[in-house]
Amino acid sequence: MSQANIPNITPSITITITDAVNLLLASIALEELALAHIVNAEAEKIQFVLGTLGTGVTPAPTISQLLLVNDSVRRTMQDVIKKEMLLQFKLENIITGLP
């Protein structure tokens, strides 16, 4: 077997500190937006099961089924909270690192 022939690629990328900070802040904002969509979806899941959003579930869910939905939403919200904490740390690191 012959060795791969990789061309010499040396891109010239120039990003200022301001550009880097703006990109990091934009990444936090986009992640926050995604988390907001997840929280909204979980709220709609509960509303649908309870019948307050649309027609709801037919026949009406049992208590055990409601508890299963509640557990699912609880676990998802725990993960959202964990991600929120990480984003808070990321934001604090960006702010404290500014000149």
Image: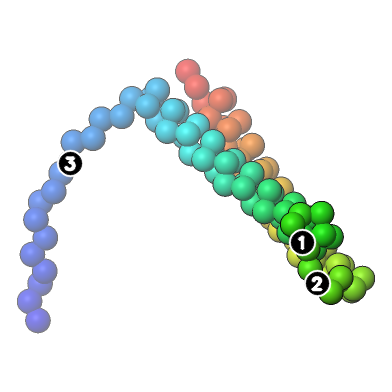
Residue 96, position as x, y percentages in the image? 57, 25
Q: Give the image location of residue 2, x and y in percent.
A: 7, 76
Residue 80: give x, y in percent of width and height.
68, 51
Q: Identify the amino acid type marked 3.
A: Pro
- Residue at image coords 84%, 74%: 59
Q: Which circle, 2 or 3, is nearer the viewer? A: 2
Q: Is residue 77 left or right of residue 9?
A: right
- Classify 10 Å Cα crowding around label 2: few (below 14), some (14-19), many (20 and above): few
| Badge count | 3
Q: Secondary structure at mark 3?
A: loop
Q: Secondary structure at mark 1?
A: loop
The residue that disc 3 covers is 11
Q: Is residue 50 in view?
A: yes
Task: Indicate whether 77 appears above or below 18.
Answer: below
| Residue highlighted by disc 2 | 58
Whether tag 2 and tag 3 are in contact, CB under 8 A, the answer is no
Residue type at the position of mark 2:
Thr
Q: State the residue at coordinates (67%, 43%).
A: 85
Q: Residue at x 17, y 41 (%)?
A: 11
**Distance of label 3 from label 1 (alpha carbons):** 57 Å
In the rendered image, which quarter contains the N terminus? bottom left
Q: Quadrant of residue 44?
A: bottom right
Question: Which residue is nearer to you in this view: 19 or 61?
Answer: 61
Name the foreground residue: 69 vs 91. Answer: 69
Task: Report whether 14 appears left or right of 62.
Answer: left
Q: Which residue is mark 1?
A: 55
Label 2 and label 3: CA atoms lie apart by: 60 Å
Q: Earlier in the sequence, mark 3 or mark 1?
A: 3
